[in-house]
Image (cartoon, coloured by chain):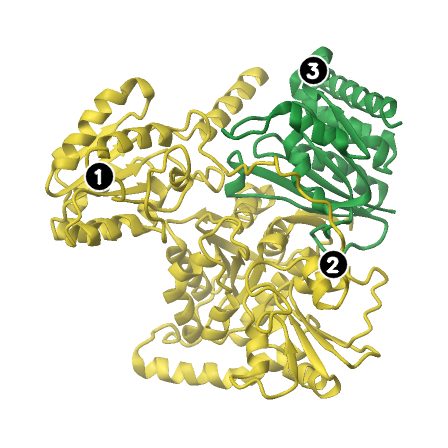
Chain colours: A yellow, B green
Amino acid sequence: MQKQLLLGDEAIAQAAIDAGLSGIYAYPGTPSTEITQYVISSKEAKEKNIVATWTANEKTSAEAALGMSYAGKRAMVCMKHVGLNVAADAFINSSITGANGGIIFVVADDPSMHSSQNEQDSRFYGKFAMIPILEPCDQQEAYDMVHYGFELSEKFQIPVMLRITTRLAHSRAGVARKTSREQNLVKLPENLKQFILLPAIARKQYKDLLNNQPHFEAAAETSGFNTYTDGKDKSMGIIACGLAYNYLLENYPDRNIPYPVVKVSHYPAPAKMIEKLYEECDSILVLEEGYPILEELLRGMLNKGKTIKGRLDGTIPRDGELNPVIVGSALGFETPQLQEIPSLVANRPPSLCKGCSHIDSYNGINEALEKYGKGRVFADIGCYTLGALEPYNAINTCVDMGASITMAKGAADAGLRPAVAVIGDSTFTHSGITGLLDAVNDKSSITIFILDNSTTGMTGGQPSSAFGKIEDICRGIGVEEEHIRVLKPLPKKHEENLAIIKEELEYDGVSVIIPRRECIQTLNKRMRDKFKEKAKA
Amino acid sequence: MKKDIILAGVGGQGILSIAAIIGYAAVETGLYLKQAEVHGMSQRGGDVQSNLRLSDKPIASDLIPHGKADMILSVEPMECLRYLPFLSKEGWVVTNTKPFINIPNYPDEKQLMAEIEKLPRHIALDAESIATELGTAKAANMVMLGAASPFLDLEYERLRDAISFFFGRKGEDLVKLNHDALEAGRKFAQNNMN
């Protein structure tokens, strides 16, 4: 079959479709978005009646996928690394319930924080949950691992993590597909108490999980994704995890690596291969795209064994993603002489689009807050986080999904008046609702802006779970009707909006201001599509 | 055969359409290809690049190593300079000269052009003007692709086929317009290669 050019994300999606997937659930998050997007847009997936849907947040995604697994079908849940923090409760406990139909957690990490607030390494979570982790080195392996992952999940009745990083997620290469597999039929777990984590049952199942560890280790030695390649020069042995393996190969154009190499793409890490490497070589170089997890394990707390080189001893920078030159320098190659960037080249940070409704919202907020002074706007995660930059300098915090409302509440409790929260519509339904309930119950004196552009903008305009529901949600939670104010954020409405904002800032209680105007990107796209439709007709 | 190309521009300028056409032509030629893209936050008007790697042998890294790129193909003049650390000593810079100014501290245009003129191997052209003369400024990216074409080691006909493939659905007129744009860019480069 001819190879298809696919992003790493798309290879995973296509593999899931081919491997008999019945449902995929996700909340959009860079660099994981394109997996679910691909299945949603796939004709083939539609013909196969595969459920593909954006959910309110990663936790609801994970639980829906677990429910599908309970019912015997194959399910996938996709998220960015920080999304796993949100889904962590479901994720960790799913290792105790185990799986029925195969279930894969795809987690896309973002080392170097291209589009994220940290660079946490999801392999820690996988180890924490004590489940198998697959970490592909390229697009083809990503494709193959989805097939294998579902089989592994069903064989041991255990969720499997597929961990990728930005460069694989968003890089395209030729991928060969396997033959399609039918979906599973609905089939209940043999033990109908398997998913009841009452302590008495959980204790037993936790023991099962512990007893399964040797099987997971054995699988990692034999799956073929981990390899030992011998080399003549035993002065150093190399462990290369996931994508790092490619950067290693890149440094040897003839692929003739003088050192013994263990490629690690399947965890628990293959202890036998690593032991052989350790016994045979004078020192070990560990290449990991992420935190120094294996490196730390090998060093131990006291680091009294053989020399272990990597991120902890400074051979490789402690933070940020790897690249061929960083790996080359760790291998002892000279860093090439590079041309310099001329000093006149200016930074070009991302910015709010021309005509974006958030611009008008921030102009209003900034002016209304002038008399109180800077430092009182608690913001959240989305396009509007760009309000932190020039020329707006409009916000003071951005921590995690939903933290705007709750941090504003805490600061108001401390006596900061006014305290302002800024949150997007999609982020509000992701993790803002419960915080609003806290504020209402405590009658906290905060002014909340729910910037409603009617989409999940930053990730490319996916539908927002909040669409058409925001006022009802606020009312339902108990925000007073007269303090739910809807604005149209447009330059010509500036004065009118400003008056309303000023009024609500003075109110001693919870008020919600909803500046509502569609995202300029989705609006443009809608107009283009409409134009095309008309042209066709 | 190995060609490592950094495609550069500003989020929203459509560098991925150039990547898609080169990619299609490369695959039709039977070459291996890897293409790393930027998605997410930077797409909002920030600097964006794509690493496009073509080879007749399997490609390992998704990223082009520093100092190894054979070409920087930039649809914006300042952006072509940002990636100079990736360019090999023999590498070419092919850049559009029309600035995209969305920051307050954009450099003086004369000084910027002087920096580009200093590069030992470069092609600098006003792709918008050339495309506008042909009928639409929208074809500027195909002018840029044409200007890069003499350095790509891909058969010219394959690039034309790729354009037919991508624009075919939109009608013959648009295919021809983009073919013309490709040709105009190519001619410019051939006349300015020294």
Q: Is residue A74 above or below residue A457?
A: below
Mark 2 belongs to which amino acid? Thr
Element type where label 1 sits in the image: helix
Q: Quadrant of residue A46?
A: top right
Q: Residues within 10 Å of mark 1 (few under 14, many from 20)?
A: few
Helix, strand or loop at label 2? It is loop
Mark 3 Cα-neighbour bin, 10 Å: few <14, some 14–19, many ≥20 = some
For disc 1, the chain is: A
Disc 1 and disc 2 on one polypeptide chain: yes
Q: Is residue A182 left or right of residue B161?
A: left
Q: Nearer the viewer, residue A436 or A283?
A: A283
Q: Residue at x 75, y 40 (%)?
A: B23
Is there CB contact under 8 Å for labels 3 and 2? no
The amino acid beneath tag 3 is: Ser
Q: Hey, which quadrant is residue A449 in on the image?
A: top left
> Is residue A159 found left or right of A220 in the rendered image?
left
Across and down, in percent, residue A150 comes to: 57, 65
Observer-side mark, 3 or 2, equals 2
The residue indicated by pointer 2 is: A335
Residue at 44% of width from left, 33% of height from top? A352
Q: Is residue A228 left or right of residue A120?
A: right
- Spot occupied by residue A171 in the image (x, y as percentages of width and height): 65, 49
Label 3: chain? B
Q: Are marks 3 and 1 on the same chain?
A: no
Total tally of numbered discs in the picture: 3
| Disc assigned to residue B129 | 3
Q: Which residue is mark 1?
A: A472
Front-most of residues A113 and B166: A113
Mark 2, residues whose alpha carbon is within 10 Å: few (<14), some, or many (≥20)? few
In the rendered structure, the residue with mark 2 lies on which chain?
Answer: A
Residue at point 65% right, 27% down?
B111
Q: CA distance from mark 3 to mark 1?
A: 52 Å
